[in-house]
Image: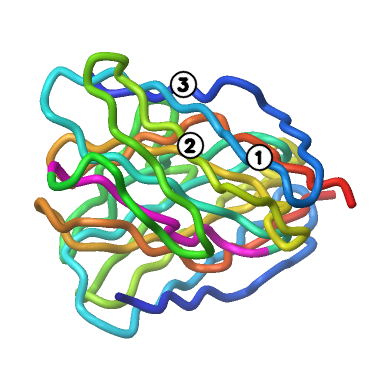
Amino acid sequence: SAVISQKPSRDICQRGTSLTIQCQVDSQVTMMFWYRQQPGQSLTLIATANQGSEATYESGFVIDKFPISRPNLTFSTLTVSNMSPEDSSIYLCSGGTSGVLGELFFGEGSRLTVL
Amino acid sequence: AQSVTQLGSHVSVSEGALVLLRCNYSSSVPPYLFWYVQYPNQGLQLLLKYTSAATLVKGINGFEAEFKKSETSFHLTKPSAHMSDAAEYFCAVSDSGNQFYFGTGTSLTVIP
């Protein structure tokens, strides 16, 4: 298994500012993903964080708004840029290994409120 | 493409009663199926997973799920609900273990 740590766990931000969320995994994982979970809703995949290269974004999410870095196998960051109240959400980092035994492990999430 | 449908966004059961949370999947290839639980203000925790071995999968906290290919279902059950089971439950499907797709979730309430 893998333990995933995220910080900050929560933050309140002003409209127009940016916030970077950090994600640290305690063991090497082949995959890292960033999800958004809006109040009362399921998880929406934002992007796959690729080590040493640009992230792969899902439809509706763009790099300018959600720049992602993954400099090594165990660390990734997600920045929410030029925030608006619509960005208020829980952002979840997940990691895992691919293949038949693959499963995802999740951090506790970063609860973001934009005023 | 893969997807999951969870029937019932809210389920209420009495303490000690059977828990049944429904999940149906759509997959063009043999799927890997998962159930996750999310307690308030926490991340998701894996309850159990099906990866083409036994069709009846036992997980943590007394939960189990049965893979039924003919019904494309992977319903989650627990014989006797406990107050601590109150949480949000998510079904997820993966094709090769590289991409995961989550259902909309079912909120379980346990009535004392």
Give the image location of residue B26, x and y in percent: 29, 18
Q: Secondary structure at mark 1?
A: loop
Identify the magenta region.
B42-52
In the image, what residue type sits under mark 2?
Answer: Thr
Mark 3 vs mark 1: give the one in front: 3
Q: Is residue A26 left or right of residue A54?
A: right
Neighbourhood count class around disc 1 (C-alpha, 10 Å): few under 14, some 14–19, many 20 upward: some
A59 vs B76: above or below = above
Neighbourhood count class around disc 2 (C-alpha, 10 Å): few under 14, some 14–19, many 20 upward: some
**Which disc, if any, is residue B5?**
3
Give the image location of residue A58, x and y in percent: 34, 33
Q: Secondary structure at mark 3?
A: strand
What residue lies at 71% left-to-right and 43% top-to-bottom? Answer: B17
Quadrant in which residue A10 is drawn: bottom right
B60 vs B70: above or below = below
Give the image location of residue B109, x and y in percent: 78, 43
Residue position marked by numbered label 1 in the rendering: A38
Residue position marked by numbered label 2 in the rendering: A44
Tag 1, which chain?
A: A
Q: Are marks 3 and 2 on the same chain?
A: no
Q: Is residue B49 magenta?
A: yes
In the image, what residue type sits under mark 3?
Answer: Thr
Quadrant in which residue A110 is drawn: bottom right
What residue lies at 41% left-to-right and 40% top-to-bottom? Answer: A45
What residue lies at 46% left-to-right and 21% top-to-bottom? Answer: B5
